[in-house]
Image (spheres, rainbow, N blue to C red):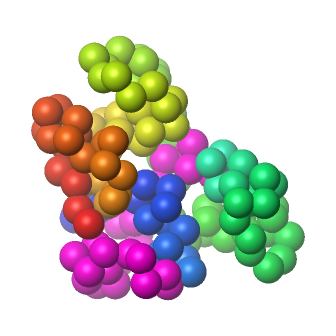
Amino acid sequence: MAYLLDTHAAIWVVTDDHRLGDSARQLLVHASPDKLVISDCTLTEFARLQTSGKLRFNGDPLDIIEMFTQRFEVQPVTPWIALRSASYDWTHRDPMDRNILATAEFRQIPLVTIDREITPFAATIGVKTIW
């Protein structure tokens, strides 16, 4: 089974961060690399965190982003994902979170996230979350 990783989950997988939930860690450690998916907007979120100084990685930021594209399958936005993310009846307005959730719905795969804004709404549209 494939899994879509929210931005923080992807970063924590790459950095082997202890904040990655136990259930998520067990699944992701045993998943084959071709089953780990990120939304293309995760690359943008990572770049924003890196350039703003909120996240620090050693090395060239472009090389780090390139490493994400090699470590995970990157799901590009599709017309369906774009329309679906914009049309959710959801008070949470963050376009990145909406895009990530629509990507999980489009792919029909679980979303690995700890985000308390996403988890309750995901259940209403049939997207399973794991942490």
Q: How many marks?
A: 0
Q: Where is residue 112? Give x, y as percent.
A: 32, 60
User: Residue, x 54% and y 68% (percent of image)?
Assistant: 11
Question: Which residue is more in the foreground, 117 or 62?
Answer: 117
Q: Where is residue 52? Give x, y as percent.
A: 78, 53
Task: Say left or right for 65 vs 3.
Answer: right
Q: Quadrant of residue 18?
A: bottom left
Q: Quadrant of residue 53?
A: bottom right
Can I make out residue 99 in this image? no
- Image quarter in which the N terminus is found: bottom left
Does the stretch in magenta take in 104? no
Residue span colored magenta: 16-43
User: Residue, x 25% and y 46% (percent of image)?
Assistant: 119
Q: Is residue 67 above or below residue 51?
A: below
Q: Where is residue 101? Give x, y as percent.
A: 35, 39
Task: Say left or right for 129 vs 104.
Answer: left
Question: Which residue is more in the foreground, 38 or 122?
Answer: 122
Q: Is residue 79 above or below residue 97?
A: above
User: Residue, x 47% and y 76% (percent of image)?
Assistant: 13
Can I make out residue 111 in this image? yes
Q: Where is residue 46? Give x, y as percent.
A: 65, 55
- Image quarter in which the C terminus is found: bottom left
